Image (spheres, rainbow, N blue to C red):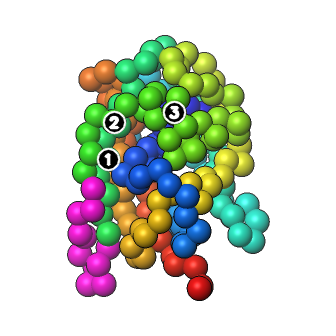
Amino acid sequence: MKTHAIFLFSLLIALAAAQQNEYTVQFDTLEIVSYNKDLIENPVVTLFKFNETSQAFNGSGILKKDLGMDIKVNMDAAKVEDDGKLKQMANVKDVDMCDLIERNQFGLKDLLKYGNFTTCPWKAASYVISNAMIDVTKLPPKAPAGKYIMNLQHFSGTTELMQTKFTGSVIPKAQ
């Protein structure tokens, strides 16, 4: 579903677009914290192990109204320190999701092939995404190893669509 894809697309916002082969990303949880019931119905997302080396996600839901082109995301990312405390790593606001997708930033447009959603503007419809895999080679090099928490808020104009949260780890590959 487009709204679920928004938060997964958004998780890459804080990262620069560059090829890398130094690490992998292990997603632990994907959670829909809240959503606007006037605009979204029955949002569901499932993270799973696709095969021995890849994770994937499925999502579905109904977008009840057209959203247009003004889709923004705010992101707060923190690294979990050894003592359990959170270290703020990134805090970005009002990032234009339509532009990121259109430019295929972080390979976001590539994810469209896994479902029935399109680039902006987004129309009211029932959306599904199946067996979607994020290509971690499109993430930037030199990401610090460790466990991370990312909170996202998604907006259409000034109307909040959804709040999401994910946890995961950056794991260096053996050299």
For disc 2, the marked residue is 95
Query: Could you give the CA–CA distance between mark 3 and mark 2, rounded to whole angstroms?
Result: 13 Å
Front-most of residues 155 and 41? 155
Pair 3/2: label in front: 3
Quarter holding the N terminus is top right
Query: Is 67 part of what is drawn in magenta?
Result: no
Amino acid at dot 1: Met
For disc 3, the marked residue is 103
Residue visible at 43% across and 18% down? 69
Amino acid at dot 3: Arg
Residue 126, image x, y percentages? 63, 24
Residue 91, image x, y percentages? 25, 51
Image: magenta residue range: 80-90
Residue 78, image x, y percentages? 30, 63
Q: Which element type, helix, strand or loop, lies under badge 2?
A: strand
Whichever of labels 1 and 2 marks the residue nearer the N terminus, that label is 1
Residue neighbourhood size for the residue with mark 2, other residues' Cα within 10 Å, grouped as few (<14), some (14–19), many (≥20): some
Residue 105, image x, y percentages? 50, 41
Amino acid at dot 2: Val
Front-most of residues 105 and 79? 105
Residue visible at 55% across and 37% down? 104
Pair 1/3: label in front: 3
Whichever of labels 1 and 3 marks the residue nearer the N terminus, that label is 1
Query: Could you give the CA–CA distance between mark 1 and mark 2, rounded to whole angstroms?
Result: 9 Å
